[in-house]
Image (cartoon, rainbow, N blue to C red):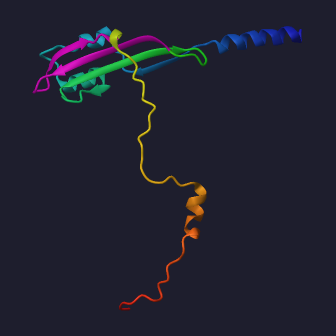
């Protein structure tokens, strides 16, 4: 009887170990939220109230907001699989009124891979021993023979 219970427990634990970890990053908008944004009518404040703060504001023009989101699932230590990703661009005029709200094509997006280079530095590299004992190897200057006012 106990062997059967342990076997059932082991099988149940094995199945729970295969449960994927779901992760949501950013802001994925549904079509109802996006339909509330009317070009020529909706203000910047209304967009922030309806969609939330943007994921990013354009680097060169603060009149362009981006809402970017991604949902992934990951099994154990494997690379996460992208389930859904979305990017929306909202453009404003000089008065803060929406001029356009467009879904961007994320099929052409790519992950940014950081470069694994190091910036060269000049000078000497000291070991911990040199840092601790370095002053002991240099003679102490004799300051007793200096002339000057006291």
Q: Is residue 53 visible?
A: no
Residue 106's place in the image compared with 56, above or below, is: above
Residue 21: percent from left, percent from top = 55, 17
Say above or below: 129 vs 65: below
Q: Is residue 106 left or right of residue 43?
A: right
> Within the magenta stretch, is there residue 65?
no
Q: Residue at x 37, y 18 (%)?
A: 69
On the image, the x and y values in percent for residue 35 come to 24, 10
Q: In the figure, residue 147 lies in which quadrant?
A: bottom left
Magenta extent? 81-106
x 38%, y 16%: residue: 110
Q: Quadrant of residue 36?
A: top left
Q: Which quadrant is the C terminus positioned in?
A: bottom left
- Out of 59 and 122, give the one closest to the viewer: 122
Q: Between 140 and 101, which is closer to the camera in this rendering?
A: 140
121 to the left or right of 131: left
Q: Is residue 94 magenta?
A: yes
Residue at position x 21%, y 27% from top?
45
Q: Quadrant of the N terminus?
A: top right
Percent position (x, y) of residue 102?
A: 23, 12
Left or right relative to 19: residue 65:
left
Residue 81, given in percent of the width and then of the height, sits at 49, 12
Marker count (numbered): 0
As drawn, the residue found furthest toward the right would be 1
Our reading of the magenta stretch's main secondary structure is strand
Residue lying at 30% horizontally and 20% vertically, measured from the top left: 67
């Amino acid at each position: 009887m106990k062997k059967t219970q342990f076997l059932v427990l082991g099988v149940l634990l094995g199945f729970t170990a295969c449960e994927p970890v779901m992760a949501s990053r950013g802001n994925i908008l549904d079509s109802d939220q996006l339909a509330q944004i009317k070009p020529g009518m909706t203000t910047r404040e209304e967009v922030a109230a309806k969609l939330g703060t943007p994921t990013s504001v354009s680097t060169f023009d603060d009149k362009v907001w981006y809402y970017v989101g991604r949902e992934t699932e990951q099994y154990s230590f494997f690379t996460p699989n992208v389930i859904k990703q979305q990017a929306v661009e909202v453009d404003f005029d000089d008065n803060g009124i929406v001029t356009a709200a467009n879904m961007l094509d994320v099929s052409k997006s790519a992950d940014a891979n950081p470069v694994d280079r190091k910036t060269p530095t000049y000078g000497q590299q000291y070991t911990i021993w040199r840092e601790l004992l370095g002053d002991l190897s240099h003679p102490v200057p004799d300051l007793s023979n200096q002339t000057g006012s006291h």
